[in-house]
Each structure stands twice: as C-alpha cells, then as structure tokens.
Image (tube, coloured by chain):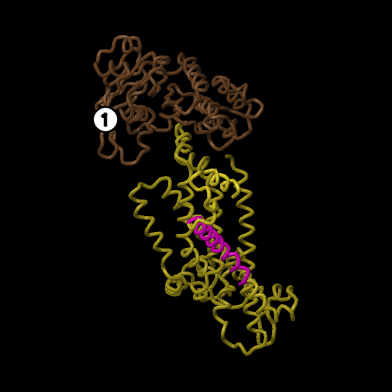
Chain colours: A brown, B yellow
Amino acid sequence: MDAHIQVKNLDAYYNKQQALKNVNIEIPKNQITVIMGPSGCGKTTLLKTFNRFFELTENTKLTGEVLVDGQNIYDKDVDVTEVRKVVGLLAQRPSPLPMSIYDNVVYGMHLHKMKKDRKEYKEAVRHYLEIAGLYEEVKKRMHDPATSLSIGQQQRLCLARGLAVEPEIILGDEPTSALDPISSQNIEARLLELKQQYTTVIVTHTLRQAKRLADYVIYMYLGEVIESGPAKEVFGNPKHERTKQYLEGLF
Amino acid sequence: MSESTSIFSSNPKTEGRSPRPSAAPRTRRDQAARRLFFIMTLLPIILIGIVAFALLVRAWPILSVYPLSDLLGGTVWKPNDGIFGFQPFIIGTIWVTIVGLLLAVPPCILVSIYLAEYAHARTRTLAKPVLDLLAAIPPVVYGVWGLLAIVPFVDDVAAPFAERWLGFIPIFEVTQPTGFGILAGGIVLAVMIAPLIVSVTFEVFLTVPHDLRHASLAMGATKWQTIRNIVLPQVLPGIIAAVVLGASRAFGETIAVLMVVGNVANIPTSVFDTAYPLPALIANNYGEMMSIPLYDAALLGAALVLLVVILIFNILSTLVLRRVARRKWA
C-alpha cells in the first residue's frame, strides 16, 4: 500500500485522560479513508492529530509520530502552518469567515501569497468554486456575505476555501452531520469526485455514509484502533468481534 | 386578555366563577413587578434630565447675563473682575483625556490580545484578578502616587528627554519646570482607566467563536494572521466601546488629576503645560469665595458644560459604533 499518512505509537491525553491508545495505522494515498466508531472512541481526536489541531486544546499531551509523506509533522523544525496548508480540514459545522463569498475563497491563497495578481486570484476562485459545485449558484453574488448562503452552500464554500490552498490531504470531521440530506449527498458526491487527486480522511458516525464513501476503513473503540483495512474486507468480513457487532448495529 | 378569558370560560371547572385571569394575585404581582422594573429602568434617564435641569436653573444667572459664545469661547477666567471664560477648562479637560487615552489604549489592546489569544489558562487566571484589583484602588491613592512618582518622573526624565530630542515639535515643548501638568495627569489617568479598557476588550475577544479562528488556522494561517484578519475586525466595535468607556471615565476623573495637573487656568499647547480640567475647577472652588457675584452660577455652568461635553461625546461615539457595527458581516 502506498501510505500517505503513517501513525506510529500515538498516545494522546486530555488532562490525565487518555484519548488515544497506541495507535498504529497507515492511510492510503488518493483514497477515501473512513474512521468510524461509537461516540467518544477518539475518532475526532485522531483526525485532529493529522493537522495538529489537537494541540489547540489546552492541557493536552501527545506522544508518538504522525508521518505525512514520511515526514513526522511533530518534529521540532516542522512549521505547523505548512502542515495545515498540506492537510486541509472540513469542519463539522460550516464556518464561513465573516467576509464575502469571494473573500472566503481567496483568504487562504492570500495568506500564502499563492498567485501573482488579481486576475489569477479571480480565476482561481472561480476554479475552486466550480470544483466544489457552488460556482453556478453564487457567480452573480460573489461579494455578498458568505453567511447569506444556505448551510449546505456554506459547507461547499468551506470545501472550495480549503481546496484553494492546494492541500494534498482533506480531513473531514463529520462534514455532513449539520446538513440536510440533499446537501449531504452533494458534499459526498464532491468528495467522491475529488478522491483521485486528494487523500481524504473522513470521520463519520453513520455507517451508511461510511459504506458509501469508504475505500479504506479504520474502526476505533475506546481510543484504540480495533481494525483497519480495505473497505471490502472490513465490511464484508470483519476479523474482530467488536467490529462485527458495530457493523450489525448492536451498539 | 379577551383570548384568555374565553379559554377560561370554556373550561367547565372555572365556569360560573369570575373568569378574570388578570385578577389572580400572582398575575397582579407579575404585572406589579413588571411596572417596578420599568420604573427602575426609567430612573436613570429621568435622573440625567433632572440633573441637567437643576444645573441649568442654577447656572441661569450667568447664562442670562453673558452670551454663550462669550462663556465657551472666553479664554480668561477672572471671577473677581466678573470675567468667566470656560475655554481653558474645556481645552484642558480634552488634553488630559486625550493624552490619557493615547497612553492607555495601545498597550491595553495588546494586553487583551495576549490574555485572550495567547496566554495559557493559568496566566489568565493570575493576571485578570490583578488587573481588576487596579480598578479597585481609590483615585486619591493614584493622586498621591502621581505626586510622589509621576510628577518627579516627568520633571527628571520625560521633560529633559523631550527638551533634548523632541523640542522642535510644538506639543512636546517644555514650558515650565515643575513636572506638574498634562503629561503627569495623562499618565495617572492612563493607569486608572487601563483595567477598565483591558477587561472590556478581553471580554469582547472571548465573544468571537472558536470556529472562526479554527477555520483560519486550518488553512495554514499563523496565529497573528488569524488575529489580524479575522478576530480584530470582529472585535473592533467592542474595542471602540471600551475606549469610550475609558474616555468617559477620564473626562470625569477629578481628584487624581487635580493633584498632578497644575491647576492653572491657561490654554495648553504642549503636553508639558499645566492645565485646569473642568472637574478640578469645580472641586477646588465650589463652596469657597461664594460671595463673588455669579461665581456659584459660573461653577455650576462649568458642571453643565462638563455634562454636555460628556453627553455629546457619548452620542458621537455611539453613532460611530453603529456605523462600524453595520459595516461588518453577519
């Protein structure tokens, strides 16, 4: 397997409470990996360690390694902003920045001074809004506040905004849980389209969504990875009793 | 009311009894409470009106003799000769307030940014009470501190420094050799209003949702980029409100300022000049030399001017605040 992210001996603590226990996994390149498991099992925590968001919470501790393209992102000489540029995040609730639709998409590109002039920025904004399937809906009101969009549109805007800084990895923390079914479907369709070019890691608590999206599955329980592997194997023939029970909907 | 009456009368249990819910004791108590709270809310507004009216009545003797332009525009204050020019006091008040704000606001904003955005929770729980404590120190203690520490500091350090390096700028011209003056008053004021500004600004920073910061950080923004681009535009109206609060406090501050500001009725042109702010004028003189004709009316006129200046300032800043608030998204 061509691993894009490798996690080695990862332990994570909130205060004294251990949230991740000796996690060792590999996440394949340019596929959709779904992390699933019951509430409180550490799936979001694990996701947050991939873009170093875990450390934004106070009184946390982390040991072990997370390698992206073979580089441990927790090395002292790694610039955290570079990590987050490469590893984008689609949050649980869409969080449009308090500015216009256009400015939301251009924001990240400005941060990293990615384009030369206004024209290039404008083209890029259009490009990423098209990828996110939002361009047609907003092309006539690019300079309206982003908050004037519906919540489903906001989430697609957040996707466009995240893609605009040219990440290689997209993290999704239950990215459809706040959306209505049609908007959810829309986001899922985008993610499936994008998986050729991006390594995608999605946390979800809905089994059906996991089955629709996953190429690769990680099943977690109480901070431990119980089972991981290609979706066909895990869904078709789970090796562990716990995974089997979860898939059967026993808890 | 009629709606609830019909509900009551359609209820077989209450039929035949007087179906008037408003007559129920607890409903009456509820309405009484409502009225009481309303009157309490109205009280401050009425009070401002009463105070302004009383001042106007008491200042009327002088207002009816001299035209307003003479009083406000007059630069000479010689009560014995019947000359009452308020301008030195108005200008003095504005100078001291502005110097105080200029010294206080920038560091206060930096402190609240640090406390709200960077500081560890432990630092915060330690620093906040200390700052709040600063607000609890009585003004007279600040005044004494100003006399013992700030006036000598201005005299020995600030004035020589300005004389050497900044003398060519008119507002830094050293005009008198005592250390008493606007700079000393401004420094004392700055320290006094700082806790207020910090604590209001800090609270405003906390109102910005974490999601917004995280959205920016997730795209690889640095902390400072996030603060500058996302957080600061959101908190700007709040910062202005904090500054206004500080300014109102500074305008009215009396004792600490009058102890260090020199109290000479001249029109200042440099931060090293002495000044005589309106509150100091009133506090120093009211109740003395009242035999001078119109003196009483002149001092209460000064109080009225102070009130009006503060009201105008507050109204203007409210308008600014609204403008800024309208400009931001969401």
Which residue is under mark 1?
A11
Q: Is residue B28 in the magenta section?
A: yes
- Secondary structure at numbered mark 1: strand
Using residue A247 as the reference point, say whether residue B190 is left or right of it: right
Q: Residue A126, position in %: x, y?
A: 60, 23
Using residue B313 as the reference point, say whether residue A95 is left or right of it: left
Q: Which residues are magenta?
A: B26-51
Q: Residue at x 64, y 25 (%)?
A: A139
Residue B2 appears in the picture as rendered: yes
Chain designation of label 1? A
A142 up-or-down from B267: above or below: above
Q: Residues within 10 Å of mark 1 (few under 14, many from 20)?
A: many
B300 up-or-down from B102: above or below: below
Q: Nearer the viewer, residue A111 or B32?
A: B32
Using residue B75 as the reference point, say whether residue B9 is left or right of it: left
Q: Residue at x 69, y 87 (%)?
A: B81
